[in-house]
Image: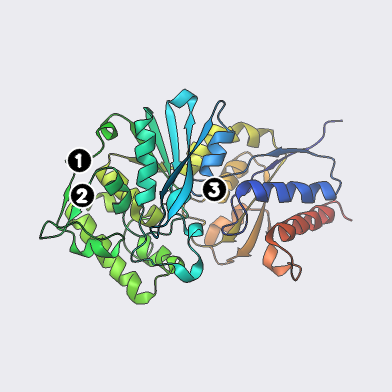
Amino acid sequence: MIRPRWLLAPQEFKGTLTAAEAADAMAEGLREASLDVVLDVAPLADGGPGTLDALLAGTPRGERRKLTVRGPQGMPVEACWARLDEGRTAVVEMAQASGLSLVPPGQRDARAACTYGTGQLLREALDSGCERLIVGLGGSATTDGGKGALEALGFRFLDADGAPLPPGGAGLARLSRVDASGKHPRLEQVELLIATDVTTPLLGNDGSARLFGPQKGADAATVEELETALATFCRIVDEATANLPGAGAAGGLGYGLAALAGGKLTSGYVLVARALGLDRRVLLADLVLTGEGRFDRQTSMGKGPVALARLARAEGTHVVLFAGVVQRDNGPELTLFQEVVELSSQARPGATARETLREATTKWALARLGR
């Protein structure tokens, strides 16, 4: 008798579980239900946190490297990047150097947080001699339009007096010109792929400042200050690029790298899916289980669970979503999932995020078995 094959591919549960930890918790929950199934575990990423690990897992002979860089608030942090394909491809995950998880909630400063550390990782990768450089965007603490990262790559952002701007996005309101004469020489020799986890533009209600600024510590006044500063940035550099899908990812880092460093905005999910062979694995699966911390308006803007559900539905495969919180008015995307399990409605008091996910998975599996 052929045992059913289930694909287990959750994304990170932001702030609580990495994609690998979520997959492990769900697998443990399924084993506790004594299901007689074959589990195919593929922690998912879409350009945001976890992209580095996912690409390393899907690529033979990958190598993880570490570098101490400047964190989003200026303090040193130890960040990882990777070399794949014997060094021909390098991967940088901006959340490693400039991520929101690196800053405690009470210390977040959306005006001054910068991406300089991400630029240091990019510089290290370029110096390694790679031919292709993938930059995973998502999970950022910043709204600086990529200014900090570009400064680490040799660009200079100057005011009307020729003085350099201070760190962070707020200072872009005083931008007069960008000096690219000192930019890293290898930027023109590599294929720079900007792997985005959302399809948002730089400006507007769905842009970097207004949609994502509040979670980075920005109040209403700061949100509008950053919106104005980013608008000044794109007016001086390149207004057309600001409207590209993904330009607003990671506080506008997508825009900065595309407009000034020659990067190509692309779907982080597609890059990871290709590396993991998800097309083939979905085709072989009898059931797909995915998940993330919060299913809301941002999920529909290029996030992995929705893209995976579309792929599975195209093959006629049943898809189950586990999410901490589910925004039920999220439009047609929620209907891609035949089953939705909301963890917040059944969490045991005092249980950790891992325990809650494991227990919810066991409960779901037992119900499926009619126990």
Mark 3 touches mark 2? (CB < 8 Å): no
Decide which of 283, 145 is in the foreground and name it. Answer: 145
* Nearest to viewer (mark 3 / mark 2): 2
Mark 1 touches mark 2? (CB < 8 Å): yes
* Amino acid type shown at disc 2: Arg
The residue located at (29%, 29%) in the rendering is 189
* Rendering quarter of residue 59: top right
Q: CA distance from mark 1 to mark 2?
A: 8 Å
The residue located at (39%, 74%) in the rendering is 219
**Which structural element holds mark 1?**
loop
Q: CA distance from mark 1 to mark 3?
A: 37 Å
Where does residue 115 sit, x and y in percent of width and height?
Answer: 36, 53
Give the farthest residue toward the left: 161
* Amino acid type shown at disc 1: Gly
Q: Counting residues from the N terminus, which is met first, the one under dot 1 or under dot 3? A: 1
The residue under label 3 is 304
Left or right of 85? Residue 202 is left
Q: Is residue 53 above or below residue 253?
A: above
Residue 230 appears in the figure: yes
**Which structural element holds mark 2?**
strand
Q: Counting residues from the N terminus, which is met first, the one under dot 3 or under dot 2? A: 2
Decide which of 98, 68 is in the foreground and name it. Answer: 68
Viewport quadrant of the C terminus: bottom right
Q: Residues within 10 Å of mark 3 (few under 14, many from 20)?
A: many
The residue under label 1 is 182
Where does residue 217 sit, x and y in percent of width and height?
Answer: 43, 69
Mark 1 touches mark 3? (CB < 8 Å): no
The residue under label 2 is 156
**Which structural element holds mark 3?**
helix
* Amino acid type shown at disc 3: Gly
Give the farthest residue toward the right: 371
